[in-house]
Image (cartoon, coloured by chain):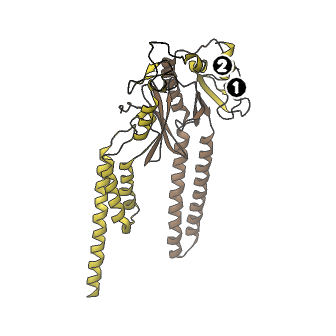
Chain colours: A yellow, B brown
Amino acid sequence: MSTTAQVENGSLTCPVCRTPLGPYGLDAVQEARCPSCRTSLRGQVFAAWWTLPEKFESKLDRAQEGEAVCFFHPSNRAALACDACGRFICTICDLPLGARHLCPVCLSKGLGKEKLPEIISRRFLWARTGLAFGFLPIVFLVWPVWVISGGTAVILAIISWWRPVSLVRGRQRWTAILAIVLGILQIAGWFGFIILISYSKSHSGK
Amino acid sequence: MSTPTPVYRKLRGGGFSWKGHGRLWRAEDHLLEVTSIYISESYRRFFFQDVRAFVIQRTNLRAIWAAIFGGVGVVCALIASGTWWAGIANSSEDWHIALYIPTALFGLAALVFFVLCVINLSLGQTCRCHVLTSTGWHALSAPTRLGKANRTQTEIVSIVQAAQGPAPTAAPPPL
């Protein structure tokens, strides 16, 4: 660990008030208090803390005669190949994504159609929404809207069959099936109520 | 260019925040924070290669929640006992019935709040976990209880050290 590394990395700060913690300010076992906000902190610093940020300029080389060049910058020497399309790319075009290295074109393709699970930041869960539409109106007995909420539950559950699912839980078919069943029950219940009301009205009139 | 979804393994301990229910999942090369509001999930990834520090901050939310649940429970219990006493003191039969209904309702509410208070106390001390990367500190939505956070820390430390190699322990964190 050089002095340069210390200066460039800056000081380890408190996660709450951003005050420098100072040397030995963080221990994996013993709790320490932040000198400023007095928050109790305990933790571990890893090797990446001491690693200098990679020198960008030093790695960017101009290509010599006969050397492989970057697909996007023909004057730059190729540093590596894109893991998705195999094109040679320089350090400017290299977009590391976890352990993989992609070119800008492949990354933008992945962003557009959610083909790269590593960059998905949000997922709408169609089957769960269908289940909420199927379940909540029954629980709260709002029967006048059952025909709408039931229909919505069935439609959402059917859509969920082809839509992307939760990254961690995978495709849960039972959620969609339950939503369809509850949706059909609501629709049947709504028609049942209508028939019952009209039947009782016609009989009370006699 | 489609790639298979990584296989995730759930880590112990969840947590609730204004953003929803949080949980940590572990993949081969990264930690995934999932914040869910039932109908949608949002994701944040922390690659083991990029994690610079993992910190547990002790919080006093446990005491605050205990005071809220306990306080509301006591108020409900006082109202329930007051209406019950008024029911006994009143000789009219109609008043008996009218006063026993709020007694039952407030008594039930008091019981619910006392149970919540006991659950909150039994779950242990509260905390908040933070991850430091090259972009700065990131507060995690889970785990929020110290016991689970300790186990999570042990697991994360071993994975990150395996990915990065051991930190130079001889030297302190830079000033």
User: Which image quarter: residue B121?
Assistant: top right
Q: Position of residue B21 (x, y in %)?
A: 49, 43
**Residue under label 1:** A21
The quarter of the rendered structure image containing the N terminus of chain B is top left
Which dot marks residue B173?
A: 2
x then y, percent, for residue B161: 51, 18
Mark 1: which amino acid? Answer: Leu
Most foreground residue, A129 or A60: A60
B148 sits to left or right of A160: right
* Horizontal and vertical percent position of residue A23: 70, 19
Residue at 30% across, 47% down: A161
Q: Locate the C terminus of chain B and report the quarter of the image it occupies.
A: top right
Parent chain of label 1: A
Indicate whether A64 appears above or below A116: above
Of all residues, the one furthest to the front in this rendering is A65
User: What residue is rendered at 44% in x and 32% in y?
Assistant: A105
Instruction: Give the x, y percent position of residue A118.
Output: 44, 33
Residue B41 shown left or right of residue A192 in the figure? right
Depth order, front residue of B30/B72? B30
